Image (tube, helix red, strand yellow):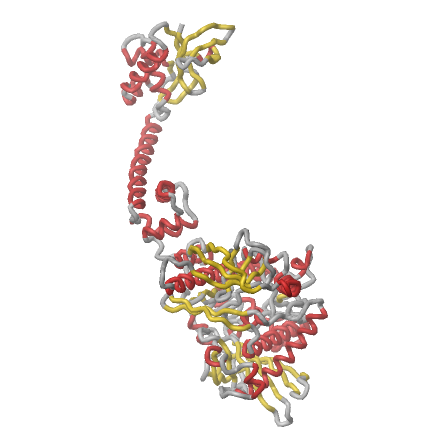
Amino acid sequence: MNLFFDESGDFKAGVAMSQQGEAYQVEMPSGKRTKVRAKDVLLQFSAPSPSEFMTDAQAIAAEIDLDFLWEVAGQDEFGFAELGTEYFGHAPKPHEAAGLILRLHAAPVYFYKKGKGRYKAAPEASLKAALAGMEKKRLQGLVQAQYVEELKAHKLPDAMRPLVLQLLFKPDKNSIEYKALDTACSEMQIAPQRLMLAVGGIKSAKDLHFSKFLFDSFPKGIGFPEITIPALPELPLADVQAFSIDDVTTTEIDDAMSVTRLTDGKVKVGIHIAAPALGIKRDDALDTIARQRLSTVYMPGDKITMLPDALVEAFTLAEGRVCPALSLYVTLDPADWSVIASETRAERVPIAANLRHNDLDAYVTEDNLAKDAGDYPYKEDIALLWKWAQFLEQGRMAKRESFGLRPEQNNRVDFNFYVEDDIVSIQRRKRGAPLDKIVAELAILTNSSWGKLLHEHGVPGIYRAQGGGSGNGWAAKMQVRMQTHAAPHQGLGVDQYAWSTSPLRRYTDLVNQWQILACIEHGVTAPLVAPFKQRDADLFAIVSAFDAAYSAYAAFQSDMERYWCLRWLSQEKAKVQTQEDNLKIEATVLKEEILRLIDIPLVIKLPGMPQVARGSQVKLDLLRWDEVDLTIEARLLDITQDASANAAELDAELDEELGDDLTEDLLEGDAEPVPDEQAVAAATEEPSAIAATVAPE
């Protein structure tokens, strides 16, 4: 006897060898034996053989017209044998009944299974809806297949053009566009980003990185709504001629300085900070714009400003104008640089000049200042500020050492990026140059002084604190954090530090400026009238949002700097006469397998590198680099300078500046390096260039 049976929805036929109770021992056409329960047996037949039977049944199933079968079935539940009699016009033969079961089971849209061998025809409305859905899916499949073919031919389908960024960064995986992209990438063995570059969906690797950042951080775009420039209150006119010192690319000029020599031999130094808080009010339309962005975003060759250009233009400290400013005046005795008096006031400040590092750095050097050599604008004022800056630095270093830290190291090199027509130049600058130090020390003094002012008046602000943190290890204790009350910043060597000197490009500074203005206008009653009161939940929300946004912006800037470093390598490679030659370049060992190129701030990881002392210089053969993945492959050629003699000193310096446990985190962009005075200088200037000690691998 042969049996036709259902095995978990799979219909099979075999020879019954024996029966034991409610089960059969069945031999399949393959020779394999299996146990079949009696209740799963649908048909018994003596001929033909099981394999021929299944072939005949499948042929019958293929001939059955589903629409006609559905009409014959009616709306009542039925068994397959009953329907077979109606459909075939006679009691179905075993292979016909089996074919009917195969057809019913394969058409769940037409027939619902109600039990073993029992079915019910789908209602007409349900059937029509299901068939429409199937037709839609079939047509979508054809469209999807067409998309796949176009992508494989390096042509971007028109329907995908407006969806490129969404497909790459936040796809709807049920859409036919995504399925087509995924299928094409699988068949071509290529990543989606590279395929989009190949078909023109993204113009370049630079646009890919920029577009991803905009998609994540600026989903509504980077345009500004129409704004009205606010009216300013009446302010007194300062009797000074102030000047600023910035990079040539700086447009948001937040800070300037002035020197006034008094008749008694004393000197009054003014630090003048742009004052948008005089026009922008908490919760007004301009504040909403600033709070949405929280900071200006910088990248080599470009930036996304926190405030609209017209508003920046109204408050930037541009030369030849009288600008609203919040000024800190410090009266000094040049004999010993003691502070006789200090005062903060809101006023209008004449800006006589915007000096640029690019024009002055070659002349304003330590040697020239010591010899009184060279001829440049504000020479006497710069010389005086240089002496005071050194005195301020010494005081901070003493304070820093009292916290148990070593003095800051100024022997590292910073790098400036300049991009024009997609050509990048990267210029080295020694950390601690006189102009940098002047700007940095005045900024540190101002931020510390105004942080103290807020604290003494009982007005909350947004502070940067470092040291005394919780957690295991030096790195955890020295992690920089933001908070709303005064606390020491041990890395800078100050008792408190409130970001206040860049209100055109950092929202925290704008908030602090509101609070400072309340202090100088209202004195002891400032806590009652300041925009933010003690334990204001909104202030905590600002700190949290700013921290997240600032980290995202910094990570993007780091990625773009790495991209432009790789572009620089491509430019250098183009200069090699034989294009088959690899690029040879010098590098410095930072730690174990981590190296930084000497000519550019590009950090790479060289797996398997032999043990070399930190600070050693090596020669690398750069094999290849990828501007999409931001990766680079290199091999070690030679150790050109061994630093093992002072390895212990180098270890201590790196561990203190970065934290031994922080190095790997920094390579992933997850931690903030311990700020020193030059890092603050970068914070007070528009960072068209950044000091890249380490970069994400």
The image shows residue 586, relative to residue 271, as above or below, that is: above
Q: Is residue 108 left or right of residue 325?
A: left
| Residue 660 position in % (x across, y down) | 63, 58
- Using the image as rendered, state which of residue 656 and residue 159 is in the foreground: 656
| Residue 154 position in % (x across, y down) | 30, 48
Q: Quadrant of residue 412?
A: bottom right
**Count of marks, rendered view:** 0
Q: Quadrant of residue 366?
A: bottom right
- Using the image as rendered, state which of residue 660 and residue 346 is in the foreground: 660
Which residue is at a point 38% across and 46% down the rendered structure image?
190
| Residue 654 position in % (x across, y down) | 62, 63
Quadrant the N terminus occupies = top left
Q: Is residue 664 visible?
A: no
Q: Is residue 243 left or right of residue 165?
A: right
| Residue 688 position in % (x across, y down) | 47, 69
Outermost residue on the bottom side: it is: 263
Q: Is residue 464 visible?
A: yes
Which residue is at a point 30% across and 43% down the rendered structure image?
147
The image shows residue 367, relative to residue 423, as above or below, that is: below
Q: Is residue 32 left or right of residue 197?
A: right
